[in-house]
Image (cartoon, grey):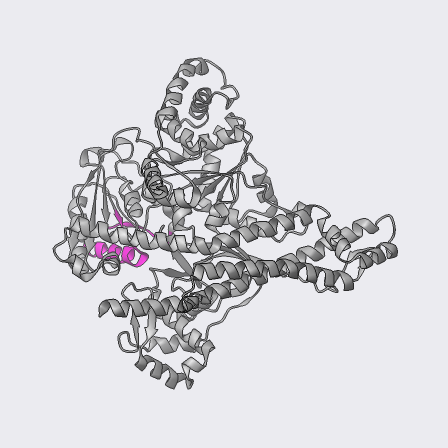
Amino acid sequence: MASIKQLIRRFLERPGSVDLAPFERVVAAAGAHEERLRELDEPPSPSMDDLAEFCAIAREAADRALGLRPYDVQLVGALAMLTGNVAEMATGEGKTLSGAMAAAGYALRGRRVHVISVNDYLARRDAEWMAPLYEALGVSVGWIGEASTPQERREAYARDVTYGSVSEIGFDVLRDRLCVDPGDLLQPEPDVALIDEADSVLVDEARVPLVLAGAADPGGSVPEMAALVRRLVKGYHYEIDDQARNVHLTAKGIDTVEEALEVELYHDPATLTQVNLALHAHALLNKDVDYIVRDGRVHLINASRGRVALLQRWPDGLQAAVEAKEALPPSETGEILDSITVQGLITRYPVRCGMTGTAVAVGDELREFYDLKVAVVPPNRPVVRVDAPDRLFAFAMDRDRALLDEIAEVHATGRPILVGTLDVAESERLALNLSGRGLECVVLNAKNDAEEAAIIAAAGERGAITVSTQMAGRGTDIRLGEGVDDLGGLYVIGSGRHASSRLDDQLRGRAGRQGDPGGSVFMVSGEDDLITHYVADEYTSGVPAQRLVSHAQRVAEGVNTQIHRDTWRYTRLLERQRGLVLERRDRILRGRAGGEALAAAAPGRWAELLEALPAETAEDVLHAAARQIVLFHIDACWTEHLAHLAEIREGIHLRVLGRANPLDEFHKEAVAAYQRLLAEIESRSVATFETASITADGLDLDDAGLKRPTATWTYLVQDNPFGSEWERMTKRLSNAIRRR
């Protein structure tokens, strides 16, 4: 019966089922205040006791301060967020203004709001753009970016509303994790998170760990390994699995490598690891698809946004292997002091809400992982864009030729064209082929994303051809140039389907904004990765194009959801442990809990030092020294705990051989390790306190052996795209069985 109830609840609360009627009634009631407000010299201070009056005042304030008078649907979107939902609003419908009104509403209720964006550019732009509205409503606003100083960050976080990228806000959480003085803390307690591009942040990047590292040293990968694997031949020395996610040496490949290195690979685990990493970098990671090389460094490309993933890197060994592949010097690596996933970061906030153009497709995940519902806000004007059926070609060569023909034919009419490609290499190849036909285009990809606003703003001009890798989170509307309406509006062409239908919808949604005319079509090849990776050969014969593509996307989305679910199952307990450790750390940082604990554990030593120190300062000196001692050992033990659990997780899948559940086994190990962690913190702290030299001037950290990292640095680590060695082996076995 319980399962039936769950099914009924799931049906009744299906994505996009939030009832908008209460919000629409409030917006309708707001109209009664408009005439009175227009006659005032300036809008009055709003009260959140009357939502209708708040909406009316916010509308009038936006009109006067920004020259933007919110549509009814924008007010509906703001109210949806004010009640803790994710508002789905189509591209061009004014999400930025809706989000600002919602953030102001929360602030007027006395809440502290973080508006979390996908990048620094949008965070700064939106904060500065919306600042006059916030000022008119009596709400303070600030923003942080990668270049913000600690003082600038502290001032921004002190405002009622703070804009920042998800990575920078996460890094500040980690930096606070190492503070030994309360005055050095940057962030207040988390309260309200309003997430822009919510599906991208909460789903696409939910698994990405943000990392704080210390004691950085140059990384390393033997350049000879890169040279060796470059000589190996695919299909002879190594094979790649059907999903192009795993690669392994064949028997001939093993012989060749062992002869070249004069080792027995399986008796030399370190060398075997280096060879495997070099082979992964060579065979599975492609320049201008997975990464670009710029300014002498490897920069990862964010697959969901088609732009450089700032500060993001692969796990150290793989990162070094790619650098060796490209003949670049190794970048620094270091001991991980702390890390937190994006999902762990967001779930710290008691109140969560957001906005995006494509939320329904991930509605189940938003509910499962964040307890969020989706409110679908209708457009201000009906969408009249004409979306043509997909065109499916057997071979990529035929699709590419048809794509060029389509662009040339439409361009001849003067109609602006936006072409969405799947990666950087494809965008540049298309630009070269267009140039060969005498057609000039503007390219927007990870290599020039700094100019994106200007490029996108001009994409609707007559005769424009714009080629972009991904349109998700670009944050700039495409307005139609003069006479373009009569030509049919912006024409969007997708050169292939993405693994997520949301990314396709975001591209398509660039045309037809605010009732503009527009059109779209996607051209798909049977050789595209989406089809070859996620559709069995026997399924392709005689299946209609649209059904084939939809099936492939459903499979791909299901795979990614399961990865998300599995990752969260493993990290959820760690996040709980992290929270408990931080609660304890905060009590010690802000008070005398550390001294009280050491006085109880080592009363003789405490009394001895009290006697030896000047009476008027003895208590303060001892408590300050105790705080430094305990904080140091909490941080050191937590770092070791993270490394230990990482090792456990890497090999936990071997437990399945003993018919044990790997997740259950991991939890057992993690709980036991946490108990040891607490005991270790106490024993080390007492040992240091017993022997440390504590004088009237305080504790000498160096003499006490309490050396913290001389420098720390932050980055995002791309979770191991190849899984554990056990996972890779079992996948190869299952693929072999399926082929037989």
- For residue 214, say whether it is visible: no
Residue ranking furthest to the front: 1
Q: Is residue 733 above or below residue 504?
A: below
Q: Residue at horizontal 57%, vertical 61%? A: 673
Q: Is residue 134 above or below residue 471?
A: above
Q: Quadrant of residue 183?
A: top right
Q: Is residue 250 above or below residue 571?
A: below
Return the x and y of residue 481 as percentages of the image width and height. 27, 36
Q: Residue at horizontal 38%, vertical 64%? A: 722
Q: How many marks?
A: 0
Work out which quarter of the rendered image holds the C terminus and state it: bottom left
In this picture, residue 55 sits left or right of residue 216: left
Q: Quadrant of residue 11?
A: top left
Residue 132 part of the magenta segment: no
- For residue 200, say whether it is visible: yes
Foreground residue among 534 and 574: 574
Return the x and y of residue 717 as percentages of the image width and height. 46, 58
Foreground residue among 293 and 118: 118
Foreground residue among 718 and 10: 10
Foreground residue among 235 and 608: 608
Return the x and y of residue 201 as percentages of the image width and height. 42, 46
Work out which quarter of the rendered image holds the N terminus and state it: top left
In this picture, residue 623 sits left or right of residue 361: right
Q: Which residues are magenta?
A: 419-448
Return the x and y of residue 665 as percentages of the image width and height. 47, 62
Q: Quadrant of residue 235?
A: bottom left
